[in-house]
Amino acid sequence: MPPNPPLDTVSSAGVSPVLEIQGLQKAYRTFLGSSRAALDGLDMVVERGDVHGFLGPNGSGKSTTLKILLGLVRADAGQMRMLDRPVPHSLPEVVPRVGAIVEAPAFFRNFSGRRTLNLLAQAGGVPRHRVDAVLEQVGMRERADDRVGSYSLGMRQRLAVASAILKAPELLILDEPANGLDPAGIREMRDLLRGLASAGTTVIISSHILAEIEQICDSVTIISRGKRVAEGPVAEVLAASAVQGEYRVRVAELERAVEIITESGLPVTVAGDHLVVGDLADPTWITKTLAAHDIWVAELTPLADLEDAFLRLTGTAPQPGGFRPVDAADATPESRTIEVETS
């Protein structure tokens, strides 16, 4: 394969991206000895100061990508630049400027949260005053002196985020940062990450909570089967993948509403607890028409949220008759992978 051209992308504002990936490839040996591609020529760009969502179905290559970036797994091919430095060659220079949670970190259960962070600060040459600052940021001040073993999953996740931001990184990489958090905790995490971005930190979030990604992220990269299928500002990705004139409609009397809409000639289908109406040039027509028959609309939204875009782009929408695997190949014994380098 011919070498890729040098990565020297510069944005319209004259600032180079914080992360560039070009042609990234990685294969693992399967259970029966064959090779399976985890990444198949992945391209990705993250601009400075963005909160960037990194999305894909289970097994699409998200975790592999993050591990390669951090030097935990070796790529088979491709080029990467992080914070203007080529990686993995310059990782020793880059790592002090990056905070990351890729897999749930293992903390000593008998240590308190504060002691855990103090030890990490000492090991990383971070000023001790940062410990109190990050405990406050992640909402752990009142539980800081309790044993980690007494923490809930959500509290351990807060501690993990605190450890990742301890050194005030320029780039923060988080894999499922809202894992285990209740709705209030998720909102606090959202506010924290937006605050970090406002202060100049670039944040990359890998998450399955698509509604949260839609609220917090400036841009997204969506991958499927190791390849990028969409990228760009959230609004542009939604607009590009939306079905024009298609709306989600929630009403109490689904069957009556279907009859009324069908008589008008518009295509309508029942999708669980709501209707999907197509070819709708003026959405107010729905509310006016159904109200004339004493049917009140509880929801009327265009099918252009991130969940719908994700399902279309990755081909993971539930099929009639029940669920199917994310990737049919993943359901076969031959595809079970052992993480062994192929090169």
Image (tube, grey):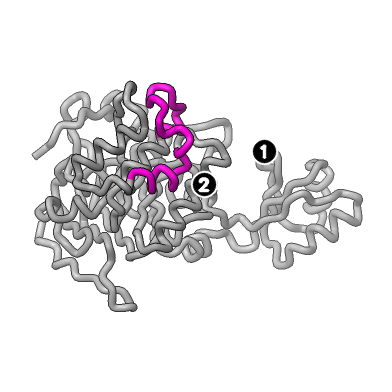
Question: Residue at the location (41% across, 34% down)?
Answer: 144
**Image position, residue 290 (x, y; %):** 85, 54
Q: Would residue 225 be seen by someone viewing this image from the given angle?
A: no
Q: Which residues are magenta?
A: 131-156
**Image position, residue 11 (x, y; %):** 31, 74
Residue 272 numbered mark, or none? 1
Q: Nearer the viewer, residue 23 or 35?
A: 23
Q: Which amino acid type is marked by label 2?
A: Glu
Mark with earlier residue (1, 2): 2
Identify the image quadrant of residue 151: top left
Q: Which amino acid type is marked by label 1?
A: Gly
Q: Tag 1's secondary structure? A: loop
Identify the image quadrant of residue 60: top left
Q: Nearer the viewer, residue 199 or 246?
A: 199
Question: Residue at the location (50% across, 52% down)?
Answer: 191
Q: Is residue 297 above or below residue 325?
A: below
Q: Is residue 35 above or below residue 171?
A: above
In this picture, residue 101 sits left or right of residue 30: right
Q: On the image, numbered disc 2 is attached to which residue?
A: 188
Q: Residue furthest front?
A: 129
Q: CA distance from mark 1 to mark 2?
A: 32 Å
Q: Quadrant of the N terminus?
A: bottom left
- In the image, which is nearer the foreground, mark 1 or mark 2? 2
